[in-house]
Amino acid sequence: MTPPEEPASGRALVLVADLRHLKAPGLETVDALARLHLAAKQLGLALVVWTEGDALTRLIGMVGLEGVLTCVERPGSEAPGTPGRREVAPVADPPCVDDPRS
């Protein structure tokens, strides 16, 4: 796998996991986030988890991953299309990544 090139601006590429609507995070959530973090890191991306409340952040701390997974509390739970929420257009043709298993 070849990581994407760094943008010309010198800023890091960030993958955001918006988990603000997650009602009851559990260990399976933390496991999935840890795996997503590793995959993102292999692609040269930083993972940031958007949360609401501190349940997920506390759980991440309890398993010792507070220095690995970055959680940011994002206020508000606006519905799509409401002011303050940024719409992201879908990518028509996402870039292909070599499958490391092949």
Image (cartoon, rainbow, N blue to C red):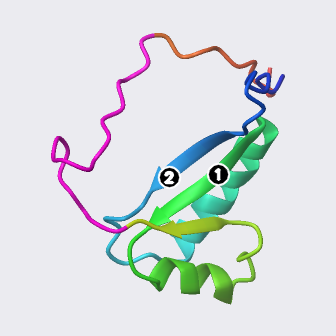
Cα distance in 3D space between marks 2 and 1:
7 Å
Q: Secondary structure at mark 1?
A: strand
Question: Quadrant of the rendered structure where residue 31 is?
Answer: bottom right
Q: Is residue 1 left or right of residue 22?
A: right
The answer to whether residue 89 is magenta is yes
- Residue farthest along the front direction in this orientation: 9
What residue span does the magenta drawing correspond to?
75-92
Number of marks in the rendered image: 2
Residue annotated with mark 2: 17
The image position of residue 29, as x and y in percent, is: 52, 67
Q: Residue at 20% across / 45% down in the picture?
A: 80
Crowding at label 2, few (<14), some or many (≥20) Cα neighbours within 10 Å? Answer: some
The image position of residue 65, as x and y in percent, is: 73, 75
Question: Quadrant of the rendered structure where residue 40 is?
Answer: top right
The image position of residue 9, as x and y in percent, is: 73, 27
Residue annotated with mark 1: 47
Q: Are marks 2 and 1 in contact (CB under 8 Å)?
A: yes
The answer to whether residue 63 is magenta is no
Q: Secondary structure at mark 2?
A: strand
Q: Is residue 64 above or below residue 79?
A: below
Report the amino acid beneath label 1: Leu
